[in-house]
Image (cartoon, grey):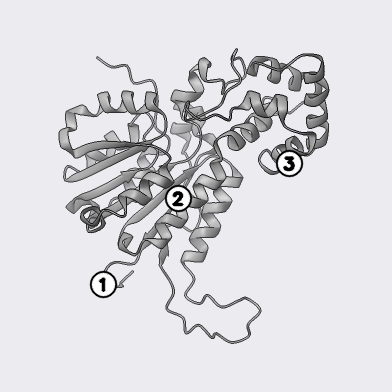
Amino acid sequence: MMEIPHIPVLLKQVLESFETPLVQKGGVFLDCTLGFGGHSEALLKAYPKLQIIGIDQDKNAIAFASERLRGFGKRFSYQFGRYSEVLKQLLENVELHQNIVGILADIGVSSLQFDDKKRGFCFDSEQLDMRMNQKQILNAKEIVNHYTPNQLEQIFRDFGEIREYKKLARLIVESRKIEKITSSKALSSLIAKHFKHPKIHPATQAFQALRIAVNDELGELERLLKVIEENPLCKGARVCIITFHSLEDRIVKMTFREWEKDCICDSNVMRCACGGGHQKGRNLYKKPLSANADELQNNPRSRSAKLRSFEFRGRNGIL
């Protein structure tokens, strides 16, 4: 019997967000970040007429989830690759277009990747990798040991929101002149010696920044949202995005806000010239959903998770 090593975050909120007549009736659901398959399994159980296509760029995740979900037969299938690229290909399939009822994306590193010390995501790993797709060339060791001071500063400032980003970049450059930094353990120890944080490990933000840079996470999220927005046959579908830090959440928040606008005129225009009628749908929640006390106790990794959900106009144009 398979040991399930992962508790999917905000599971109750995800199930409730997709509790619609369209989903209950059945159709195609796209799980853009399959991971261990926890969300997909719960959705397949809750909605017996649903068919799910899982997407992941990590072959280990696909292998695990496929085994876990094989009991659902043809109701589950998977596609390997970056979710924005695979989703675009899937949405070009006319048969799928007519039945898309939901899209879910759980953004960021999965527990499968984080808990595997060989992947180099955790602070005590002997590796310095952080690639979600292990066939990708760029990894964290390359960035840490070969990027210029200015490039490192930009990564730590923009992706880690680190106040002393110049100090951190200088520290890494000076250290690698003496000896290359080849493990996450060495990097986290170096940072911990020179930085302090009252609540989290001092290297948390730096590791987040490197992971985002290695995997182009923010760019991938933006491309995903653009693919969804530009496909007119997602009408009626619900989109749920789970994020884990402010950079991701800000992108989703602002995108959903733009989708909800009826008037798309420039804010400096005194009178509407576009004629209105551009609203693509509606935000389901005024504020993002987060973990309750029970989930926080059982799954500490859910503490920073936020879920936002958007419902597109139906094919009849009704919200």
- The amino acid type, in three-letter code, at marker 3 is Gln
Q: Measuring from the top left, give residue 316's x and y in whole percent.
A: 26, 72
| Badge 3 vs badge 2, beta-carbon distance below 8 Å | no
- The amino acid type, in three-letter code, at marker 1 is Asn
Q: Measuring from the top left, give residue 189's x and y in whole percent.
A: 72, 16
How many angstroms separate mark 1 from mark 2 (CA)?
25 Å
Q: Residues within 10 Å of mark 1 (few under 14, many from 20)?
A: few
Q: Earlier in the sequence, mark 3 or mark 1?
A: 3
Residue on which disc 2 sits: 224
- The amino acid type, in three-letter code, at marker 2 is Leu
Residue mark closest to the camera, 3 vs 1: 3
Quadrant of the rendered image containing residue 169:
top right
For residue 232, which numbered disc appears in the image? none
Which quadrant of the rendered structure holds the C terminus? bottom left
In the foreground, 282 or 286: 282
Residue on which disc 3 sits: 154
Residue mark closest to the camera, 1 vs 2: 2
Which secondary structure lies at badge 1?
loop
How many angstroms separate mark 3 from mark 1 (CA)?
46 Å
Which secondary structure lies at badge 3?
helix
How many angstroms separate mark 3 from mark 2 (CA)?
24 Å
Residue on which disc 1 sits: 316
Kindly tell me whether residue 275 is visible in this rendering: yes
Q: Residues within 10 Å of mark 2 (few under 14, many from 20)?
A: many
Q: Measuring from the top left, give residue 294's x and y in whole percent.
A: 44, 32
Q: Earlier in the sequence, mark 3 or mark 2?
A: 3
Left or right for 78, reference 140: left
In the foreground, 305 or 203: 203
Residue pictured at 64% horizontal, 16% vertical:
183
